[in-house]
Image (spheres, rainbow, N blue to C red):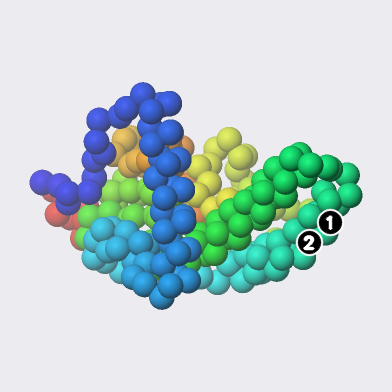
Amino acid sequence: MTDGFTSLAPPRPFAVAWLAGAVRAQRWMWSEAWCRWRGRALPSTAYALRLGAGQCFALQRGSWMGVFVPMVVFTQFVDVLVAQGFIHVIATGRQRLALHALLLFASLWTVVWAVSLRSAMRQVEHRLDAHALTLAIGFKHLCRIPLAAIADTQVIERRMPPGKDWYDACGLKPRDVSVLSFLDKPTLLITLDDAADTAWWTRNGVRTPLRRRIAVYVDEPAAMRAAIVAARPVTLGNAH
């Protein structure tokens, strides 16, 4: 018996899967920003519903969400004016027009990327159901871990002693961990069972190797850890 969300479609050639994922990510990104601006139903809301029911854990209070995105949006409006003036001085004719257009598109893309990803991460949350833990970061990352495959969980302290990072605190090397949090420092470390082969991770729809330890950001790591610990005995008991 399965939960209907534990397997993936047959893998496609890497180049095809990567191109399809990149096109899909761009479509979602522009749609999210457009719907946010127009006040319409967000694609990220529909995507979150597809992840199924369960206990949700938010990703809204990371420094990336609170500082980096607003900073990116603000600097674009400042830097683009300076860069456009610089182009006006050094370029002429069609070259100037092409550079102006390229810079405007790059600036617009950056703002859309920041706004849409921030919006998606506020709508899409990690979910824990009776069968598995789903780690979802925006539209790009999706990781599914059956509860029976989880051997241990550990809260990663947010403040480290001087000269140490969270790898040192956990006694790990970067090569030992699949990090699903690339901008915010991870707050929860999940260790898989040695024999676990049912967990999977995709980036832009492309299957990615998953190491035995998984690091991820969540606002309330202690609450998420407690929920996983409480859910695992039920799942393991039903498996026998």
Assign a secondary structure to mark 1: helix
Assign a secondary structure to mark 2: helix
Q: Which amino acid does label 2 sit on?
A: Leu
Mark 2 Cα shell of 10 Å, populated few (<14), some (14-19), many (≥20): few
Depth check: give the residue in front, 48 or 91: 91
Residue pictured at 22% horizontal, 48% vertical? 5
Q: Identify the residue under disc 1.
A: 85
Point out the residue furthest to the front here: 93
Residue pictured at 76% horizontal, 39% vertical? 95
- In-image side of 65 versus 216 (left or right): right
Residue 9 - label = none
Q: Are marks 2 and 1 in contact (CB under 8 Å)?
A: yes
Residue 194 appears anywhere in the view: no
Q: Identify the residue under disc 2.
A: 81
Residue pictured at 36% horizontal, 24% vertical? 13
Point out the residue furthest to the bottom here: 39
The answer to whether residue 80 is above or below residue 98 is below
Depth check: give the residue in front, 193 or 97: 97
- In-image side of 213 versus 232 (left or right): right
Whole-percent x, y for residue 202 in the image: 39, 41
Whole-percent x, y for residue 44 in the image: 37, 62
- In-image side of 219 versus 229 (left or right): right
Q: Which amino acid does label 1 sit on?
A: Gly
Q: In which quarter of the image is residue 10?
A: top left
- In-image side of 191 versus 238 (left or right): right
